[in-house]
Amino acid sequence: MNANIFSLDIGGNSVKWAVVSPKMVLLEQGSVHNRWSDAPSLIAGVSELVASHAEQVAGVGVCVPGTVREDDPQGSVIGGGRLSYLDGVPLGAELSFASSLPVTVENNGKARALGEYAAGALRGVDLGVVLSIGTGIGGGIVSGGRIMRGAHGFAGEFSFLRTVPFEGLVQEEDEMSGTCGWEGLKREILRAKGMLDTGGVDGHVLFDWVNRGDEDALRGLHEYSKQLCLWILNLQCILDPQVFAIGGGISAQPALLEAVLTTMRSTMADLPYRELPSPRVVACERAGEGSLLGLAYEACRRSQL
C-alpha cells in the first residue's frame, strides 16, 4: 500500500507542498503563490494540488496559522493569523470531502517542531522546543515524540508572552514577538546605527553590516540576543527542555546563533543560581522544509500508516 503523505504549508504569500515518504524522504516538492482570498477558493485551489498527486499518496497533512485542536475530528482552525478567513472553518473535513483522503490539520509552528523531531535538530530528544523566528515567534514543544498542546491546544504559542499587563491597546513591542521577532532585530540594529527612521532595510542589508564587522550593527545584534536569551531562560524555568532549536529565515545566519550562544554563556556565568540549567541552543536543521516533514510524521502517526 502507498503510504506517502502530501504535505502543504499554507502561508499568507505562498503554499509549499511536498510528497513525503513514511521514512521522511522528500520525494517531490514545490510551491505556488497563495492567490486565494477566502476559504472556499483556498480549499478549491488546495484540492486541485492534492488531486494532481492523489495516486502517489495515502493521506494529506496541512498546516496553517492559528490553533488546531488534536481532538477535533473536523480539523477546525481557531484564529488563523494572516489567514483570518479560515477562523472557524472545518478545514480538515472540507479537504477530506474534496479529496476523498484522510486529512491532518496542524498549526504551522507545531508542524515545524515535529519536523525537527522526525528528521532534524530534535532527533532523539525527549523534550525539546523549536523557536521559529519570523514576524512573530512560532514553533512548538515536543515531548515524547508528540506536540505538547495543553488543555486548549494553545501551548507553545510563544508570541503571546508578555512582560507588561494587558491594558488598553495591546502593543506588539511588549510581546515576545515584538522583541524577538524579525522587527525586533531590525529595530535594535537600526537604533544602534542611529537609523530608526530609515525604511526599506531588509535582512540582507542588516546581516551584510554584521558580517562586515560593523560595530554598531554588532552592538544592535547583541542587544537583540540579550532579549532572546532572557525569554529562553524564562522558558527553561517553565519547561526545562533538553534543547532549544532556533529556526526561521534569519536563523540561517551564523552570526545570529553565535551572538545568542555568546550572550547565553556570559549570562549564565554571571548568574548566582547554580540550580538553573544552562539552556542548550542549536540551529534548526530542516528550517525550510521542517513543516512539510512534520506534517507527514504527524499524519502517519495519527493514521498508523
Image (cartoon, rainbow, N blue to C red):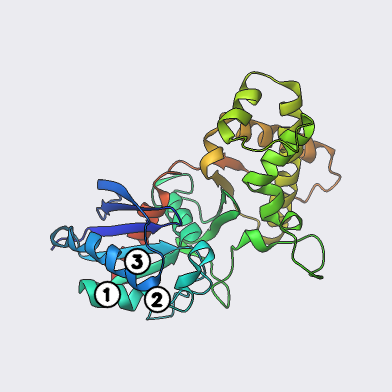
Q: Which mark is residue 96?
A: 1
Q: Which residue is mark 2?
A: 75
Helix, strand or loop under label 3: helix
Q: Is residue 269 above or below residue 149?
A: above
Front-most of 173 and 153? 173
Front-most of 235 and 97? 97
Name of the residue lying farthest toward the right: 272
Of badges 1 and 3, nearer the viewer stands 3
Disc 2 from disc 3: Cα separation: 15 Å
Q: Which residue is mark 3?
A: 42
Label 3 sits on what residue type? Leu
Disc 1 from disc 3: Cα separation: 14 Å
Residue 161 lies in quadrant: bottom right
Label 1 sits on what residue type? Ser
Mark 3 Cα-neighbour bin, 10 Å: few <14, some 14–19, many ≥20: some
Total numbered labels: 3
Helix, strand or loop under label 1: helix
Where residue 177 appears, as percent x and y from the top left, is 66, 54
Please report whichever mark, 2 or 3, sits nearer to the chain's N-terminal start.
3
Helix, strand or loop under label 2: loop
Q: Is residue 129 above or below residue 214?
A: below
Mark 2 Cα-neighbour bin, 10 Å: few <14, some 14–19, many ≥20: many
Front-most of 162 and 190? 190
Where residue 99 appears, as percent x and y from the top left, is 22, 71
Front-most of 203 and 67? 203
Question: Quarter holding the C terminus?
Answer: bottom left
Q: Give the residue at x 44% y 74%.
A: 70
Tell me whether circle 2 and circle 1 mark residues in contact (CB < 8 Å): yes
Please report whichever mark, 2 or 1, sits nearer to the chain's N-terminal start.
2
Please report whichever mark, 1 or 3, sits nearer to the chain's N-terminal start.
3
Question: Quarter holding the N terminus?
Answer: bottom left
> Is residue 66 in sight in this rendering?
yes
